[in-house]
């Protein structure tokens, strides 16, 4: 065991707990404080004792300062401090019996003899593999080190929940964050509606390898690859995922990839990135890092303008999607995605309180050809869904187009017009896509 005095993980905050372990030669002691002490104090103590027994800890002092954390959160925090102190799990602890996932020696292992399917690999119960056609309209980012964001996330209506291990997690917290995310992923009850994704750290960092080793055995649906700049980045991630899938008996290729393009290099390599792996299901754009990378200054066009008569100044509202610095990049990402037969997904809108700006951002993204957008707060979800779903007017017009075209075929006519628009096969196919999109919302 490493010789350090004290190790800690977590926070004293809603739905979380602060856990401290003092490494001493004294007999083991446990101290529990909780905002729900009278109801769950004994249960928390029992949980702590189970974790200490699993890691064969017999000395030192463990403190749990709880503010309503779930059992899985308490276990994650305790596991983090004990592994930081150098302890390894000495027995398998089946956290989710229905999934076939077990944990041993501080990292996840899977009983490959159980729940095996599809070439001997394990398939996550209740989830279909290769779900490339599932809706990706709304992707909700959640900081990986803050459990209160995740507990009720499945009820928010996002198509994909993204546990973030990159930008939202400080370097000093990444170790405990990936343990917490793994514990959330292995839970089969909290996330039954939305797909579960993890944004790992960039492959240029050592953290990414640790992320993959910790997360893959818990079988996330998707891995988001940030700062992707070449096909080699995707290929490397594919190789790492395959190695971990084989090690833990998972179905090969069951975890999909969504590269995030956030730089000039990434944009110029977009098509090669998009087609670099069979795992790719979408290409994502990251505006903020892209803008920083190309050193653009979009605020210059938001200065006050004077009317022709010189009598009044009009301030142009901020709207990143309208920014000239990203239009070409967005178009390239859309073209690359479509050429590779995967979906293009737009960046988030950072002004949480500006719902009008968010809607405009979504409508412009959809007009360009994006099929979805990421959000950073649950309140943004209904606005994104509204913007990316066909309106009633669009649906009715699409039905009219299809009906008119079918009538023209019955009548043996080669072409037909509706509302002055010539109806041909591309127009009909577009109308059918609109009907299909509207049906996904039902």
Image (tube, rainbow, N blue to C red):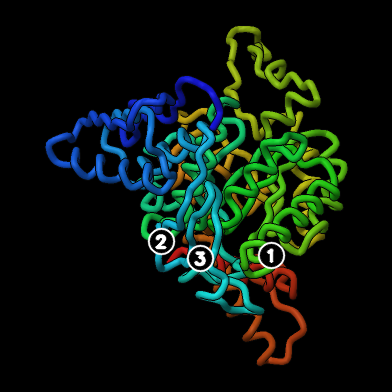
Residue furthest to the left: 38
Question: Eyeballing the image, is 282 above or below 67?
Answer: below
Question: Depth check: 69 or 334 in front?
Answer: 69
Name which of mark 1 and mark 2 comes first in the sequence. Answer: 2
Q: Nearer the viewer, mark 2 or mark 3?
A: 2
Label 2: how many residues lie within 10 Å, few (<14), some (14-19) or many (20+)?
A: some
Q: Measuring 69% from the left and 43% from the top, which residue is drawn there?
A: 209
Residue 438 is labelled as: 3
- What is the quadrant of residue 422 in the picture? bottom right
The answer to whether mark 2 and mark 3 are in CB contact below 8 A is no
Q: Nearer the viewer, residue 116 or 54?
A: 54
In the rendered structure, which disc, 2 or 3, sits on the residue that comes first in sequence?
A: 2
Q: Earlier in the sequence, mark 3 or mark 1?
A: 1
Q: Residues within 10 Å of mark 3 (few under 14, many from 20)?
A: some
For residue 246, the mark is 1
Mark in front: 3 vs 1? 1
Residue 103, horizontal then vertical, whole percent = 49, 55
What x and y, as percent, mark residue 43?
A: 22, 45
Foreground: 91 or 366?
91
Q: How much space separates mark 2 and mark 3, taking CA atoms? A: 36 Å
- Toward which corner of the image does residue 74 lie, by quadrant? top left
Label 2's element? loop
- Judge from the rendering whether residue 314 lies leftward or rightward of residue 51; answer left or right: right
Report the residue marked by disc 2. 96
Left or right position of 246 against 146:
right
Which residue appears at 84% of the width and 52% of the height? 271
Helix, strand or loop under label 3: helix
């Amino acid at each position: 065991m490493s010789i350090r005095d004290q190790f800690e993980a977590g926070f004293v905050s809603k739905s979380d707990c602060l856990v401290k372990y003092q490494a001493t030669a004294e007999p083991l002691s446990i101290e529990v404080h909780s905002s729900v002490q009278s109801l769950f104090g004994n249960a928390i103590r029992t949980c702590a004792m189970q974790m200490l027994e699993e890691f064969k800890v017999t000395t030192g002092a463990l403190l749990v300062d709880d503010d309503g954390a779930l059992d899985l959160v308490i276990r994650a925090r305790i596991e983090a401090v004990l592994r930081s102190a150098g302890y390894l799990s000495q027995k398998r602890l089946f956290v989710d019996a229905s999934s076939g996932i077990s944990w041993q020696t501080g990292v996840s292992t899977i009983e490959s003899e159980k729940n095996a399917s599809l070439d001997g690999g394990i398939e996550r119960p209740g989830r279909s593999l290769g779900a490339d056609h599932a809706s990706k309209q709304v992707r909700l980012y959640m900081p990986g080190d803050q459990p209160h964001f995740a507990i009720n996330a499945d009820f928010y209506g996002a198509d994909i929940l993204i546990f973030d291990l990159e930008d939202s997690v400080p370097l000093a917290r990444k170790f405990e964050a990936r343990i917490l995310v793994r514990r959330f992923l292995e839970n089969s009850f909290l996330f039954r509606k939305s797909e579960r994704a993890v944004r790992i750290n960039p492959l240029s960092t050592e953290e990414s390898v640790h992320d993959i080793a910790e997360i893959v055995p818990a079988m996330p649906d998707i891995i988001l690859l940030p700062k992707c700049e070449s096909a080699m980045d995707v290929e490397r991630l594919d190789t790492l995922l395959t190695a971990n899938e084989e090690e833990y008996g998972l179905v090969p290729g069951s975890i999909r990839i969504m590269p995030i393009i956030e730089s000039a290099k990434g944009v110029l390599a977009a098509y090669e990135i998009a087609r670099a792996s069979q795992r790719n299901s979408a290409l994502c754009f990251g505006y903020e890092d892209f803008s920083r990378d190309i050193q653009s200054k979009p605020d210059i066009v938001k200065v006050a303008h004077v009317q022709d008569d010189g009598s009044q100044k009009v301030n142009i509202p901020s709207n990143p999607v309208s920014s000239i610095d990203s239009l070409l990049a967005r178009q390239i990402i859309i073209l690359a995605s479509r050429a590779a037969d995967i979906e293009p997904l737009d960046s988030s809108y950072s002004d949480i309180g500006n719902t009008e700006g968010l809607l405009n951002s979504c409508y412009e993204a959809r007009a360009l050809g994006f099929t979805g957008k990421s959000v950073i707060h649950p309140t943004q979800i209904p606005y994104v869904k509204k913007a990316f779903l066909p309106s009633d007017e669009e649906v009715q017009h699409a039905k009219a187009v299809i009906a008119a075209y079918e009538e023209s075929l019955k009548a043996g006519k080669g072409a037909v017009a509706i509302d002055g628009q010539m109806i041909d096969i591309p127009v009909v196919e577009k109308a059918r896509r609109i009907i299909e999109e509207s049906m996904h919302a039902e």
